[in-house]
Image: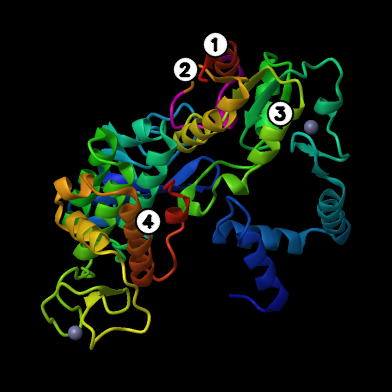
Amino acid sequence: MPQYRDEGIVLRTQRLGEADRIVTVLTRNTGRVRAVAKGVRKTTSRFGARVEPFGHIDAHFHIGKSLDILSQVESFYSYGATLSQDYAKWTAGQAMLETAERLTPEEKEPATQQYLLLIAGLRALIKNEHDANLVLDSYLLRSLSLAGYSPTFFECARCGDEGPHRAFSVEAGGTTCQECRAASSVVPAPATIALMSALLTGDWNVADASELKYRREASGIIAAYLQWHIERGLRSLRMVER
Amino acid sequence: MYEGSLQDLIDALGKLPGVGPKSAQRLAFHFLQTDSATVQNLANLLLEVKQKVKSCKTCGAVSETDSCNICNDTRRDVSIICVIEEAKDISSIEKTREFKGRYHVLGGVISPIDGIGPDQLRIKELTSRVTNEEIKEVIVATNPNLEGEATAAFLVRILEPSGVLVTRLASGLPVGGELEYADEVTLGRALKGRRQVS
Ligand SMILES: [Zn+2]
Ligand SMILES: [Zn+2]
């Protein structure tokens, strides 16, 4: 049977039959892969713990007819072991995993940048250097941006007219000038727009210094922006403890 | 693809847990070749189970009455509750003979990616039991995998203000597995050596 080897992050697992799981992995080189892990639900399984969500693994896959089969798994690190001890961080991490899955719509289409971003996001969550909600929102904006949905926070999203502009529209794809302003626009505080821009570019000095009310407003706008670009809503985002 | 009711049956069987399209077809043909009385009996049992078996109002375990045998048993210690994911986990723990208290079935685990949050589980029922009954200890026996751990972390936080002692099964259960597959000796040891988490 032909096989390949890749490293990846386990995004989700689903029960299959009596003791198996279907494992979805975002890999470094192969993109998003769905594979069967046999016998992992038994407490005697050799690699049960390694193929859990948030697991950073080095895996061998056998190419199967419909689904590939995980044959060998080594664990680099389990982000889940740390995250599951803190409910707020765990829910933030879940939203990252679901976003990574949804923004890599084609199976086995290489998405190395999405993979590297996910690892960076999970690492930032457990490192505690920034607020977990800021880390999540920054991850969401960057992941959207990699998927081709980068919002504008300065020029007009429709005509390119130089900003700053006050109106923000999810439909238009960012801030808009007065002429291009969409009916569904919101007018966030300028500090909120500055915060979102900082989160997208990774300007943590600005993000860390932001006030809670602007963070809340930014989270709401980013969530709406994400839902607009993902067909069915993101289930886990509603459960993130804000 | 078959015609009419045979295909409908194959489709319905294929939706059962652990039954793939091939097994569904095999089962459907099996019923086709079985005598009517046997099939009738099975159909009756399915309906009967659905009508008779409910869940215990207190703990959520399966029961044919409003209160299950374990909740009714006066010899059991009413001050300890063991929290489990699903009703079928009760038999795994009963087999160890290490637990003499009562149970609380959550009905699953928190799984945001599947849209299951605290509100979809019997967590409110648990907190009200802790408030209203004379509970000294809550043993959280969710599966030793990540979702089980995260659900346990949530329960600890929710139960902490009540001052009740919250414990978790001792490590020793292989991480990533499910209680259902643990052997009695290992599970019994994990129960005995449970550690305080609140
Ligand atoms: Zn414009
Ligand atoms: Zn009961």
Q: What's the CA distance linking mark 3 and mark 2?
A: 31 Å
SS of the residue at dot 1? Answer: loop
Q: Which residues are magenta?
A: B174-185
Q: What's the CA distance linking mark 3 and mark 4?
A: 49 Å
The N terminus of chain B lies in quadrant: bottom right
At label 4, which amino acid type do we have? Leu
How far across and how far down the image is residue A61, in percent? 28, 47
Q: Is label 2 in contact with label 1 (beta carbons under 8 Å)? A: yes
Q: What's the CA distance linking mark 4 and mark 1?
A: 41 Å
Residue placed at 66% from the left, 40% from the top?
A: B124
Circle 1 or circle 3, nearest the eye: 3
Q: Chain of mark 4?
A: A
Q: Chain of mark 3?
A: B
- Residue A1 at least partly seen: no
Q: Note whether B118 is above or below A194 in the view shown.
A: above
Residue that carries the numbered disc 1 in the rendered image: B193
The residue furthest bottom is: A179
Residue that carries the numbered disc 4 in the rendered image: A67
- The dot on residue B172 is 2
At label 3, which amino acid type do we have? Thr
Circle 2 or circle 1, nearest the eye: 1
Quadrant in the picture for residue A222: bottom left
Residue that carries the numbered disc 3 in the rendered image: B131
At label 2, which amino acid type do we have? Gly
Quadrant in the picture for residue A112: bottom left
The local crowd at label 1, few if under 14, some if 14 to 19, many if 20 or more residues have their Cα within 10 Å, is: some
At label 1, which amino acid type do we have? Gly
